[in-house]
Amino acid sequence: MNPEPPVSLWPDPEALGPVTDLYELTMMAGYFASGMAGRRATFELFVRKMPEGRAYLVFAGLEQAIGDLLRLAFSPEQIQAIRRWPEFGQLDPSVMEALAAVRFEGDVWSVPEGTVVFPGETLVRVTAALPQAQWVETLLLASLAYPTLVASKAARVVAAAGGRSLFEFGARRAHGPQAGMLAARAAYIAGFDGTSHAEAARRLGIPAVGTMAHSWVQSFGTETGAFEAYARVFAENTTLLVDTYDTLEGVRRAAAIEPPVRAVRIDSGDLGTLARQTRAILDQSGRSRVQIVASGDLDEYRIAELAAQGVPLDGFGVGTELVTSRDAPALAMVYKLVELEGEGKFKLSPGKKNYPMAKQVFRRRDPEGRFCGDQVARADEMAEGEPLLVPVLRSGRLVTGLPSLECIRRRCREQLAALPDRLRRLNAPPDYPITYSELLESDARRLMAR
């Protein structure tokens, strides 16, 4: 377990109270005004359905989410601003005072980061005073959905690469600077080897990787001069971008650099043909140890295609397709009330049904150690298999230290190795079996009848 406090990626982590939807704040104020602030509520976070083209998900983002809950508060300036909004102008001053003083003091159970998960099963369970449990909805969804989306995409890329090196290059394509840091972390959890995001590397201890831009080459009078200058400064760490002008000529010039550079990168063109020609030029020049890295709008399908063709590429830089998850850019993650003062709560909306009562998820394995099915049960019952949700916060305090990023990465690797072979294929159908206990089913029937 990591003895360090959770790493926050916010510019001001001490004033996150209003980082939410307005209706969370109005409901909180309404609970205080209606005398309901002391009622104990349980909400659960889960994914309603699998994104198109996915057979499994990798849960990520928990460390930052928990760190935010531990620090969650309103600044005096924020309370003053909220008090001036029309929705809050007529409230009794005591309600705003209660809002200003609120902190998250509840319990949180969660599946560990790096766990392979599926739709319909509880991922996070929050039990707290009703205003507190309501307050954290938007923040938890925003903190967990995007990292889970990117980690799930990254795991597919790792599978496609077949052991070749992978580098996250998406900072400039992410939907905002903070998203780039979240994506770098999520990709590393799923098995990427490094990131080009300098601050993510510094803050999170992820290996920093990078080459040069075409502008470096263009800034010199000749391509050879640009290569020599870069290699002179960075010595054995040099990776040269060879496709600014003529790719194969660029390779020949890179092959002539003394001492030999570490790698060359190709960012455009017919990567299969160019990689084979590049390998031949490097080998003929006595540069058999110089590696070839490819980039340029790569995704898991293109990487799998190149790998299947036996193209001599040693690694891939993946950016836009990873950090935007372009083929499945949204995750249907939701946060729903399931219990209030011990009484089950649920929805019957078409396509949005959920089960009442606090829950646990049990995972079974076959004799070879592969996952063979999950059962969602009530939190107070036992079932066959490993219980996935573990206590993280109790009364607003960490139960134990959170795992280090390396521990999360190792767990993810072990989880992915335990997937059934059919689910690891890129076009696998989402057919992992999820069942619900008879006690949950009977609770739902009883409440519906009532």
Image (cartoon, rainbow, N blue to C red):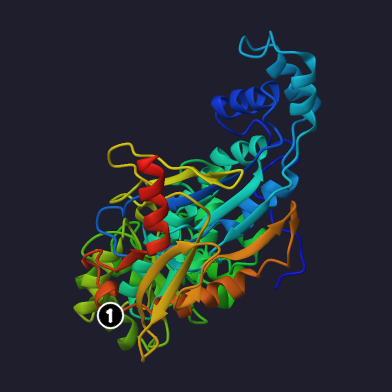
Residue 146, percent across and down?
Answer: 46, 50
Q: Is residue 137 above or below residue 421?
A: above
Left or right, residue 135 beside residue 95: left
Q: Amino acid at mark 1?
A: Asp
Residue 159 in the image, given as x and y percentages of width and height: 34, 74
Would residue 211 be visible to someone looking at this image? no
Location of residue 106 in the rendering, given as x and y in whole percent from the top left corner? 70, 49
Towards the viewer: 358 or 106: 358
Q: Give the vertical position of 341 relative to 277 (above or below).
A: above
Secondary element at tag 1: helix
Q: Which residue is mark 1?
A: 421
Of 159 and 85, the residue lying toward us: 85
Residue 243, picture quadrant: bottom left
> Label 1: few (<14), some or many (≥20) within 10 Å?
few
Give above or below for 101 relative to 270: above
Q: Residue at x 36, y 42 (%)?
A: 448
Q: Position of residue 406 (x, y in %)?
A: 60, 74
Residue beneath the point at 65% across and 70% down: 403
Q: Residue at x 69, y 8 (%)?
A: 90
